[in-house]
Image (cartoon, helix red, strand yellow):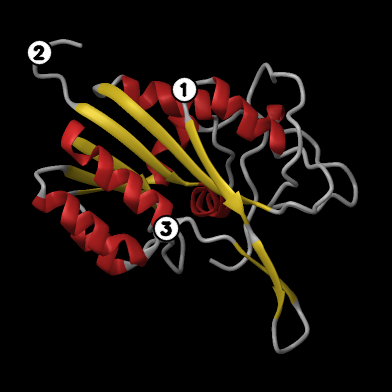
Amino acid sequence: MSTGQERIALFIDGANLHATAKTLGFDIDYKRLLGEFRARGYLLRAYYYTALIEEQEYSSIRPLIDWLDYNGFTVVTKAAKEFTDAMGRRKVKGNMDIELAVDAMELSARVDHVVLFSGDGDFRYLVEVLQRRGVKVSVVSTVSVQPAMIADELRRQADEFIDLAHLSQRIGRDPSERPVRPAGEMPGFVRDRPRPPRPIAPTRPLADEGER
Protein backbone atom coordinates (compact mmCIF):
# COMPACT_ATOMS: atom_id res chain seq x y z
CA MET A 1 0.00 0.00 0.00
CA SER A 2 1.43 3.34 -1.01
CA THR A 3 1.89 6.07 1.56
CA GLY A 4 -1.21 8.18 2.00
CA GLN A 5 -3.50 5.75 0.17
CA GLU A 6 -7.00 5.80 1.64
CA ARG A 7 -7.99 2.65 3.54
CA ILE A 8 -11.52 1.61 2.57
CA ALA A 9 -14.00 -0.89 4.00
CA LEU A 10 -17.29 -1.88 2.37
CA PHE A 11 -20.36 -2.83 4.42
CA ILE A 12 -23.12 -4.31 2.26
CA ASP A 13 -26.67 -4.82 3.50
CA GLY A 14 -27.36 -7.66 1.05
CA ALA A 15 -31.16 -7.50 0.96
CA ASN A 16 -31.21 -3.72 0.75
CA LEU A 17 -28.65 -3.56 -2.05
CA HIS A 18 -30.43 -6.24 -4.05
CA ALA A 19 -33.79 -4.47 -3.70
CA THR A 20 -32.23 -1.18 -4.82
CA ALA A 21 -30.51 -2.69 -7.85
CA LYS A 22 -33.68 -4.58 -8.77
CA THR A 23 -35.68 -1.35 -8.65
CA LEU A 24 -33.11 0.23 -10.98
CA GLY A 25 -33.36 -2.76 -13.34
CA PHE A 26 -29.89 -4.31 -13.13
CA ASP A 27 -27.97 -7.06 -11.32
CA ILE A 28 -24.78 -6.47 -9.36
CA ASP A 29 -21.55 -8.00 -10.66
CA TYR A 30 -19.69 -8.38 -7.37
CA LYS A 31 -16.31 -8.90 -9.02
CA ARG A 32 -16.68 -5.56 -10.78
CA LEU A 33 -17.90 -3.97 -7.55
CA LEU A 34 -14.68 -5.00 -5.78
CA GLY A 35 -12.62 -3.72 -8.69
CA GLU A 36 -14.39 -0.36 -8.61
CA PHE A 37 -13.46 0.31 -4.99
CA ARG A 38 -9.99 -1.22 -5.18
CA ALA A 39 -9.30 1.41 -7.81
CA ARG A 40 -10.26 4.13 -5.31
CA GLY A 41 -7.84 3.16 -2.53
CA TYR A 42 -6.63 0.25 -0.41
CA LEU A 43 -9.64 -2.02 0.11
CA LEU A 44 -9.09 -3.48 3.56
CA ARG A 45 -12.37 -5.40 3.94
CA ALA A 46 -15.63 -6.02 2.08
CA TYR A 47 -18.43 -7.36 4.29
CA TYR A 48 -21.68 -8.82 2.97
CA TYR A 49 -24.60 -9.40 5.36
CA THR A 50 -27.57 -11.68 4.75
CA ALA A 51 -29.95 -13.96 6.63
CA LEU A 52 -30.76 -17.57 5.68
CA ILE A 53 -33.88 -19.70 6.06
CA GLU A 54 -32.74 -23.05 7.44
CA GLU A 55 -35.69 -25.13 6.22
CA GLN A 56 -36.07 -23.79 2.69
CA GLU A 57 -35.27 -26.04 -0.25
CA TYR A 58 -31.96 -25.42 -1.98
CA SER A 59 -31.79 -22.18 -3.92
CA SER A 60 -29.54 -20.92 -6.70
CA ILE A 61 -28.72 -18.01 -4.37
CA ARG A 62 -26.42 -20.25 -2.31
CA PRO A 63 -23.66 -20.19 -4.98
CA LEU A 64 -23.52 -16.39 -4.70
CA ILE A 65 -22.76 -16.63 -0.99
CA ASP A 66 -20.09 -19.25 -1.66
CA TRP A 67 -18.58 -17.19 -4.48
CA LEU A 68 -18.39 -14.12 -2.23
CA ASP A 69 -16.68 -16.21 0.47
CA TYR A 70 -14.02 -17.36 -1.99
CA ASN A 71 -13.49 -14.04 -3.77
CA GLY A 72 -12.59 -11.30 -1.34
CA PHE A 73 -15.76 -10.81 0.72
CA THR A 74 -16.36 -11.54 4.38
CA VAL A 75 -19.87 -13.01 4.45
CA VAL A 76 -21.86 -12.66 7.69
CA THR A 77 -25.04 -14.71 7.98
CA LYS A 78 -27.59 -15.76 10.57
CA ALA A 79 -30.80 -17.76 10.63
CA ALA A 80 -33.90 -15.82 9.62
CA LYS A 81 -37.10 -16.01 11.64
CA GLU A 82 -40.37 -17.03 10.04
CA PHE A 83 -43.75 -16.06 11.49
CA THR A 84 -47.39 -15.55 10.57
CA ASP A 85 -48.88 -12.08 10.91
CA ALA A 86 -52.38 -11.17 12.13
CA MET A 87 -53.75 -11.59 8.59
CA GLY A 88 -52.40 -15.12 8.36
CA ARG A 89 -49.65 -14.18 5.92
CA ARG A 90 -46.27 -15.88 6.13
CA LYS A 91 -43.51 -13.37 6.89
CA VAL A 92 -39.74 -13.62 7.15
CA LYS A 93 -37.57 -11.39 9.31
CA GLY A 94 -33.80 -11.28 8.88
CA ASN A 95 -32.42 -8.03 10.26
CA MET A 96 -28.60 -7.80 10.20
CA ASP A 97 -28.27 -4.20 11.43
CA ILE A 98 -26.61 -5.09 14.74
CA GLU A 99 -23.99 -7.33 13.14
CA LEU A 100 -23.11 -4.68 10.57
CA ALA A 101 -22.91 -1.90 13.17
CA VAL A 102 -20.67 -3.89 15.53
CA ASP A 103 -18.27 -4.86 12.74
CA ALA A 104 -18.08 -1.27 11.49
CA MET A 105 -17.28 0.02 14.97
CA GLU A 106 -14.60 -2.63 15.52
CA LEU A 107 -12.91 -1.77 12.22
CA SER A 108 -13.23 2.01 12.55
CA ALA A 109 -9.74 2.51 14.02
CA ARG A 110 -8.14 0.81 11.01
CA VAL A 111 -9.90 2.57 8.11
CA ASP A 112 -10.19 6.06 6.68
CA HIS A 113 -13.36 5.56 4.67
CA VAL A 114 -16.42 3.35 5.22
CA VAL A 115 -18.75 2.74 2.28
CA LEU A 116 -22.20 1.63 3.42
CA PHE A 117 -24.46 -0.04 0.85
CA SER A 118 -27.89 0.57 2.37
CA GLY A 119 -30.67 3.12 2.44
CA ASP A 120 -31.92 2.08 5.88
CA GLY A 121 -32.43 5.10 8.12
CA ASP A 122 -31.60 3.00 11.18
CA PHE A 123 -27.94 3.37 10.21
CA ARG A 124 -27.94 7.15 10.63
CA TYR A 125 -26.58 7.05 14.17
CA LEU A 126 -23.89 4.54 13.20
CA VAL A 127 -22.74 6.94 10.49
CA GLU A 128 -22.64 9.80 13.00
CA VAL A 129 -20.54 7.81 15.48
CA LEU A 130 -18.09 6.71 12.78
CA GLN A 131 -17.71 10.34 11.72
CA ARG A 132 -16.95 11.36 15.30
CA ARG A 133 -14.12 8.83 15.20
CA GLY A 134 -12.65 10.55 12.18
CA VAL A 135 -13.91 8.12 9.55
CA LYS A 136 -15.36 9.39 6.27
CA VAL A 137 -18.65 7.65 5.47
CA SER A 138 -20.17 7.28 2.01
CA VAL A 139 -23.63 5.78 1.55
CA VAL A 140 -24.68 3.96 -1.63
CA SER A 141 -28.38 3.82 -2.53
CA THR A 142 -30.57 5.72 -4.98
CA VAL A 143 -32.85 8.72 -5.33
CA SER A 144 -33.34 8.02 -9.04
CA VAL A 145 -36.70 6.33 -8.41
CA GLN A 146 -39.85 7.46 -6.63
CA PRO A 147 -40.03 6.99 -3.76
CA ALA A 148 -36.30 7.19 -3.09
CA MET A 149 -34.68 4.02 -1.74
CA ILE A 150 -32.71 5.90 0.92
CA ALA A 151 -33.99 7.52 4.10
CA ASP A 152 -33.52 11.29 3.97
CA GLU A 153 -31.86 11.41 7.40
CA LEU A 154 -29.24 8.85 6.35
CA ARG A 155 -28.47 10.70 3.14
CA ARG A 156 -28.04 14.02 4.97
CA GLN A 157 -25.79 12.46 7.62
CA ALA A 158 -23.37 10.85 5.15
CA ASP A 159 -20.22 12.66 4.04
CA GLU A 160 -20.91 11.51 0.50
CA PHE A 161 -23.97 10.04 -1.18
CA ILE A 162 -23.31 7.75 -4.15
CA ASP A 163 -26.33 7.03 -6.32
CA LEU A 164 -26.28 3.38 -7.35
CA ALA A 165 -27.80 4.38 -10.68
CA HIS A 166 -24.55 6.21 -11.50
CA LEU A 167 -22.53 3.07 -10.75
CA SER A 168 -24.66 0.69 -12.79
CA GLN A 169 -22.49 0.84 -15.93
CA ARG A 170 -19.37 0.04 -13.90
CA ILE A 171 -20.64 -2.63 -11.51
CA GLY A 172 -23.68 -4.06 -13.32
CA ARG A 173 -23.88 -7.53 -14.80
CA ASP A 174 -24.50 -7.96 -18.52
CA PRO A 175 -28.23 -8.85 -18.82
CA SER A 176 -27.35 -11.74 -21.11
CA GLU A 177 -25.49 -13.38 -18.21
CA ARG A 178 -28.47 -13.46 -15.84
CA PRO A 179 -29.30 -17.06 -14.89
CA VAL A 180 -32.85 -18.35 -15.21
CA ARG A 181 -34.52 -19.15 -11.87
CA PRO A 182 -35.95 -22.69 -11.77
CA ALA A 183 -39.75 -22.89 -11.82
CA GLY A 184 -41.28 -22.84 -8.37
CA GLU A 185 -38.13 -21.65 -6.64
CA MET A 186 -38.77 -19.20 -3.85
CA PRO A 187 -36.46 -16.16 -3.96
CA GLY A 188 -34.92 -14.47 -0.97
CA PHE A 189 -33.39 -16.87 1.50
CA VAL A 190 -31.57 -20.15 1.24
CA ARG A 191 -31.50 -23.18 3.46
CA ASP A 192 -28.33 -23.58 5.51
CA ARG A 193 -26.82 -26.74 4.07
CA PRO A 194 -23.42 -28.19 3.07
CA ARG A 195 -21.79 -26.12 0.36
CA PRO A 196 -21.79 -27.24 -3.26
CA PRO A 197 -18.49 -27.36 -5.20
CA ARG A 198 -16.73 -24.01 -5.42
CA PRO A 199 -18.47 -21.85 -8.05
CA ILE A 200 -16.49 -20.29 -10.84
CA ALA A 201 -18.44 -17.06 -11.18
CA PRO A 202 -20.99 -15.11 -9.14
CA THR A 203 -24.66 -15.86 -9.62
CA ARG A 204 -27.76 -13.72 -9.41
CA PRO A 205 -27.64 -11.32 -6.43
CA LEU A 206 -29.58 -12.20 -3.31
CA ALA A 207 -33.30 -11.65 -3.67
CA ASP A 208 -35.60 -9.82 -1.28
CA GLU A 209 -35.39 -11.04 2.31
CA GLY A 210 -38.88 -10.21 3.54
CA GLU A 211 -39.57 -7.69 6.27
CA ARG A 212 -36.61 -5.88 7.67
Query: Left or right: where does residue 71 sit relative to residue 60?
Result: left
Splitting the image into 4 quarters, where does residue 151 fall?
Answer: bottom left
The front one of 175 and 51 is 51
Q: Tell me what residue is drawn at x 73 percent, y 29 percent.
A: 195
Q: Tell me what residue is drawn at x 54 percent, y 36 percent.
A: 28
Task: Determine the secondary structure under disc 2.
Answer: loop
Q: Which mark is residue 3?
A: 2
- Image coordinates of residue 129 in percent, x first then y, are 17, 56
Task: Determine the secondary structure under disc 1.
Answer: loop
Badge 1: residue crowd in 10 Å (few <14, some 14–19, many ≥20): some
Query: Left or right: where does residue 148 sit relative to residue 113?
Result: right
- Image coordinates of residue 97 in percent, x first then y, are 42, 58
Identify the residue under disc 3.
97
The front one of 198 and 25 is 198
Q: CA distance from mark 1 to mark 2?
A: 23 Å
Above or below residue 58? Residue 118 is: below
- Image coordinates of residue 45 in percent, x first then y, are 35, 29
Identify the residue under disc 1.
72
Q: CA distance from mark 3 to mark 2?
A: 33 Å
Residues at badges 1 and 3 in contact (C-beta under 8 Å)?
Answer: no
